[in-house]
Image (tube, rainbow, N blue to C red):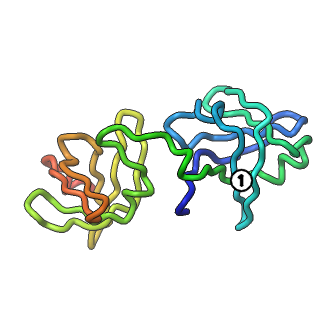
Amino acid sequence: MPGYFEIGKITNTHGLKGELRVYPTTDEPERFSRLKEVDVRIKGHARTYEIESVRYHKQFVILKLSGINDATAAEALKTAVIVIPDKLALPLEEDQYFIRDLIGLTVFTEDGEELGELIRVLPTGANDVYVIKTNDKELLIPAIKQCILDVDIAAGKIIVHLLEGLRELP
């Protein structure tokens, strides 16, 4: 979704007063506290809501949006995605990239062999893992400095060093 970043998914309602349980899909869930409004997208429709309150419970963000005042109204937003415009994106540090910019890049070894296309990024806790679609399988490459040698978004490519055994994993 160009122009917008997904920062959360509404997984359920919370209580009877229209609060929403949101699973944050951002590295910094605290960002919800700094926002005044968000766009909610569900089934091809989008609407901007002002944020009335934000609190945190376990791994979830509990969000109260203006106009959503009961459990029935909140239920209608279950499975929706919460997005913000690009201009509200947090600044990246060196060697950090937005996942949406990585998807679709062509991956090459340091020797120039084309491996395939980056199709998914798996967060694992310690480090992300890049899923590369090759001709016959998916290759999993840890997103660590020893493996990811260069990322060139403008050129549409990533250069990797394959650690011993990575190619043989099922």
Q: Nearer the viewer, residue 10 or 139?
A: 10
Q: Amino acid at mark 1?
A: Val
Q: Position of residue 82 (x, y in %)?
A: 66, 49
* Vertical relation: 27 (above or below) 38: above
**SS at circle 1:** strand
Looking at this view, name the residue that lies furthest to the front.
Answer: 87
- Tell me how many marks there are: 1
Say which residue appears at 22% left-offset and 48% top-offset: 148
Answer with left or right where residue 102 lies relative to residue 38. left
Q: Position of residue 165 (x, y in %)?
A: 16, 49
Q: Is residue 19 left or right of residue 4?
A: right
In the picture of the structure, the residue carrying the numbered disc 1 is 40
Question: Which residue reaches farthest left?
Answer: 111
Quadrant of the frame with the C terminus: bottom left
| Nearest to the observer: residue 29 or residue 143 | 29
Looking at the picture, how far across and down is residue 27, in whole percent?
Answer: 49, 37
Residue nearest the viewer, comparing 14 with 52: 52
**Looking at the figure, which quarter contains the N terminus?**
bottom right
Q: Position of residue 105 (x, y in %)?
A: 32, 63
Residue drawn at x 20%, y 51% as measured from the top left: 150
The residue at the point 70 percent across, 52 percent down is 39
Q: Identify the residue at image location x=76%, y=57%.
A: 47
> Visible in this render: residue 156?
yes
Q: Mark 1 packing: few (<14 Cα in 10 Å), some, or many (20+)? A: many
Q: Nearer the viewer, residue 113 or 38?
A: 38
> Where 70 falls versus 132 (above or below)?
above
Report whether residue 60 is seen. no
